[in-house]
Amino acid sequence: MDSLNIRHHFPIFKEHSDMIYFDNAATTQKPKYVIDAISNFYTHHNFNVHRSVYTDAGETTKMFEQSRQNIASFINASSAKEIVFSAGTTDSINLIANGYYAKHIQAGDEIVVSIAEHHSNLLPWQKIAKNNGATLKFIPLNEDANLDLNAAEQIISDKTKLVAVTAVSNVLGNINPIDQLTTLAHEHGADILVDGAQAAPEIPIDVQETPIDWLAFSGHKMMAPTGIGVLYGKQDLLENMDSPRVGGEMIESVSTTDYKVKEIPYRLEAGTPNIEGVIGLDAAISYLKELKTTNVQAQCEKLGQYLYDQLNALDGVSVYGPSNRQTGIVSFNVDNIHPHDAATFLDSKNIDVRAGQHCAEPLTHKLGVNATLRASLYIYNTIEECNRLVDCINEMKEFFNGSK
């Protein structure tokens, strides 16, 4: 995959030609193909969906629903009915928690998560556990900083009602063994929810080959607009899910005392949807398909491994996560330099990295640090940019510590 050629598809790199953007786990840049799709929508198809009989609105509704079908195909859902549009991963997981498990988790039940979860896949389950009298359990990491499957086998039991895990850690960058966890959860009669926020941008997902029950992911991490996400759920689960939000669009009929909701997925999408976001997400997925997700994964893995090896070879630099890299996410620290100071120094060199706890505070504490730096690479990043980061870290060490 030619990263330099791909960069030409992204207008922001023409405006910021000196920028090295290593914060893709937070949000990705947008290709012209996606920007043009959004512009085309507003220029030619800016009509509301599902509720008007005139031709123009009908055409927009067709575009909207075709996007739903394309997104279902992208993850190999059995039906477009299993695709619910949300505001993002956090919103999807909250909808699942409040719309389904708030009434299906009882006192004495157990919810299992990993210690590496993003707060969006931890806080909703803390809330459900507290409100319903359930127990929240954590799968630890092993010595290689991977999810400990042996421990998972002991923790997941017949009391477990839900296993909620990320497919890819947004701090460690490792791919979790979703196949094995799915089998383990189902052997005990539990459901499994996968946070796919970091996986969907670069890893092929097939919800029938690996029969997970729920999947949540965000558009903005995969070159689509912000404010759009996907909630995938098996049809029988969605049909038993309450509508946490009620109002226009999701109802069949309303009286002064009651209302009747539509079938799924529409009854879970109250109000005017983010039409622009859906069109943009569809375009981003088309772009990813053109690049081929397997190629995207291989490129991100190659870059992540290269950067990990270069950083790991530096004195005074601690790199977190497995030595065998699987994605473009690499978290690290530089001895005696606070991550925020380090990020500020790198910013002065036009290198954008993340500094902080990355919305994964329990994991940060488990690593024995208060914060880390995170360089997250994507398809438009290059080996040369990785080398520039390493050079600047050496400059930074000399600036702060007076030596290399």
Image (cartoon, rainbow, N blue to C red):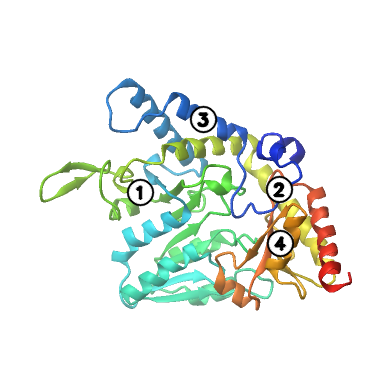
Q: Is residue 106 above or below residue 278?
A: below
Q: Quadrant of residue 29?
A: top right
Q: Which residue is drawn at 67% across and 68% down?
A: 372
Among numbered discs 4 and 3, the one appearing first in the sequence: 3
Distance between the alpha carbons at the discs numbered 4 and 1:
47 Å
Residue 298: mark in rendering: 2
Disc 4 element: helix
Residue 155 in the image: state x and y as whole percent. Answer: 49, 76
Q: Circle 1: is it few (<14), some (14-19), or many (20+) Cα within 10 Å?
A: some
Disc 1 element: helix
Q: Circle 3: is it few (<14), some (14-19), or many (20+) Cα within 10 Å?
A: some
Task: Please name the amino acid that badge 2 sits on.
Answer: Ala
Task: Please name the amino acid that badge 1 sits on.
Answer: Gln
Q: Quadrant of residue 10?
A: top right
Towards the viewer: 187 or 300: 300
Towards the viewer: 158 or 15: 15
Residue 321 in view here: no
Q: Do the residues labelled 1 and 2 touch (CB within 8 Å)?
A: no
> Which residue does the numbered mark 4 point to in the structure image?
344
Task: Please name the amino acid that badge 3 sits on.
Answer: Ser
> Which residue does the numbered mark 3 point to in the structure image?
39
Task: Please name the amino acid that badge 4 sits on.
Answer: Thr
Distance between the alpha carbons at the discs numbered 1 and 2:
32 Å
Disc 3 element: helix
> Which residue does the numbered mark 1 point to in the structure image?
235
Among numbered discs 1 and 2, the one appearing first in the sequence: 1
Distance between the alpha carbons at the discs numbered 3 and 2:
31 Å
